[in-house]
Amino acid sequence: MQFMPPRLLILVYPLLCSTTSSASRWPSITSNIMASTSSPNNVKKAPKTATASTTAGYMMKMPPLADKRSVAEQLCQTCSGPIYSQGLETFQVPMALYEVNRARVVQAMLEKDSSAKGLILLEGGKQTTRYDTDFEPVFRQESYFHYLFGASQYSDCYGVLSLPEGEATLFVPSWGVETETVCGPSPEFEGVKKELGLERVFGVGELKSFVEQEMKRMEDDEEENKSGETSSPPNLFLLKGMNTDSGNFATPASFEGIEKFKTVRDDDTLFGCMAECRVTKSPAEVNLLRYTNWISSMAHVSVMRATRPGMMEYQLESLFQHHTYTHGGCRHMSYTCICACGPSANILHYGHAGRPNSRLLTSNDIALLDMGAEYHCYASDITCSFPVSGTFTEDQRAIYESVLAAQVSILGKLKPGVSWLEMHREAFRHILKGLIKCGVLTAGGEEDVDKVVEEMLDADLGAIFMPHGMGHLIGIDTHDVGGYAAGTPQRSTRPGLKNVRTAREMEEGMVLTVEPGCYFIDPLLEMALANDKQKKFINADRLQDFRGFGGVRLEDDVAITADGCENLTLCPRSAEEVMDVMKGGVWPPEKDVMPELKRSWAVCKEGKMEMLDMES
């Protein structure tokens, strides 16, 4: 893994945060900067382990939280300070992005309780082994930990964020000689601090004494500042809460001796605040998601061009992974690739255990490829559907264009204040209309098709043909957190609607997938044909033509803006675009033939996303 040379985030902090003497505010930092800038070889390496005296009295006067956030936002805009990159032309992530995240979390905690003080403690992801073997799967950082510290490549760490100051301290492991012989040197504290743009980095062995001393210092400060009013002691805030997508719980950090803080331990506050912060993205996060969408979109195009009858589904998966890693530096996929062709496409999460993308493609298949790459732990989630032969049949095109019509309609309506459940129903309407048009469903002679569609919705017929949710929040996780947070609309119990991953109203800064689909799933079709309220709308003879068809899904990642939305995904979408690309046509095209898709045309050049001026 290659990193761009750090540009010293700490160098610009004092200059931008205050017009007063930065040396008087940050004496130890400015003196170190002067030494390091006058002689690069003058920087002293941090000790492998910090002593008690190293951590004692570490506090220095820091700029106010609002100033820190403002500076970090400026660094993100200019892509200055420490940078993460996989080298070559891959995207440069400003580590100030995580400073903004930290400031947002601290601010959220203080908005919940203006007197909140103490330490936020998170435990990072562990390097695991496969079952009882010593094989180590590729490490991926725990998402909440990454959100605050951006330490994507460091396992077995702890992180502390102080309240209300918002100072970040990372604790990294120090290995013995035997491990260093195999895995290389232990993380060097000063190097990690500069690389990640953090205030302090110590060894994991110093965590217990650090927490004890800092909690004691805060207690002493509270005693000194008392003016007769009642106040609470500092708390140790730990992360605990349920992920509403998985049903799994975030595990609170633990270390030897943590029981000493059981009277001031708070497992209730942090999770809700952090989850809510992750619901809306900063401009820097959106730009990072723009990159993951760009590289994944180009990979989908590459796979489209290579697809031929006689290939195996897993070859399409392999081509996608090759493109995103070779050209984008994406070592991880955001989720298991779904390469479902022909009847495979009626299995919504095809590609998992028991369905390993192993079918042979035929010329009659329509391919449904749901694949997205991850970069620095930020996801993409994109689905393309296209004819394996390169040309749509009449029936394939009819289903495809009904799904596309749903997507276009939703993109035209998305803006702050819009209900996500209503967008799901909007998808149902267009898919049902498309099925009426191609004869699978019947309006029974009623001229008012819209009226009949509403009757179909009342009968829950939409859920037969689109049984999944219309989309979900996306960010550090593919199914990002906060969908059913406390205080937000709760999950519906209606068929179809109960599978929607959030019922929230849209807010500026949200990033969600828009993924309408239409499928012919035999067990659901049989249920509908046995349901008196639903079967009256079904043309059973015409339905037989679509048995074994599979399905169509189109999925784009969309950022909600102040007055609408911005489509980050750049895949061919019109039937003509799809067929042209499969014949070798240029992509991105010279002209945007579907501006209603609101595609935000961009390209990564020299590590930065550049917007394209596309003719429409």
Image (cartoon, helix red, strand yellow):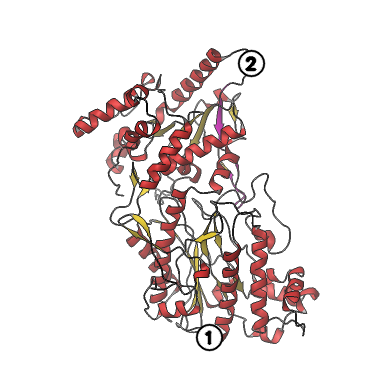
Query: Does 440 sit above or below residue 108?
Result: below
- Can residue 420 be seen in the rendering of this structure? yes
Q: Which residue is mark 1?
A: 393
- Mark 2 or mark 1, which is nearer the start of the sequence? 2
Residues in magenta? Answer: 233-249
In the rendered image of this protein, does residue 101 appear above or below residue 519? Answer: above
- 543 with respect to 606 (left or right): right
Looking at the rendering, which quadrant does residue 545 occupy? Answer: bottom right
Marker count (numbered): 2
Residue that mark 2 sits on? 229
Query: Badge 1 local density, few (<14 within 10 Å), some, or many (20+)?
Result: few
Q: Residue furthest right?
A: 532
Report helix, strand or loop for mark 2.
loop
* Residue type pointed to by label 2: Glu
**Quick one: 511 or 42, which is closer to the camera?**
511
Where residue 572 sits in the image (x, y, percent)?
A: 46, 72
Q: Amino acid at mark 1?
A: Thr
Residue 471 is situated, as x and y percent measured from the top left of the image, at 58, 61
- Dot 2 crowding, Cα within 10 Å, few <14, some 14–19, many 20+: few
Give the left or right position of residue 34, taking residue 360 as reference. left
Question: Which residue is at the far front?
Answer: 19
Q: Secondary structure under badge 1?
A: loop
Magenta highlight on residue 142: no
Mark 1 or 2, closer to the camera: 2
Q: CA distance from mark 1 to mark 2?
A: 77 Å
| Residue at point 38%, 42% (across, down) | 75
Query: The C terminus lies in which quarter of the figure?
Result: bottom left
In the picture shown, does residue 321 fall above or below 197? below
> Measuring 54% from the left and 35% from the top, which residue is drawn there?
107
| Residue at image location 34% in from the left, 24% down from the top | 21
Residue 600 versus residue 204 in the image, above or below = below
Image location (x, y in percent) of residue 563: 56, 57
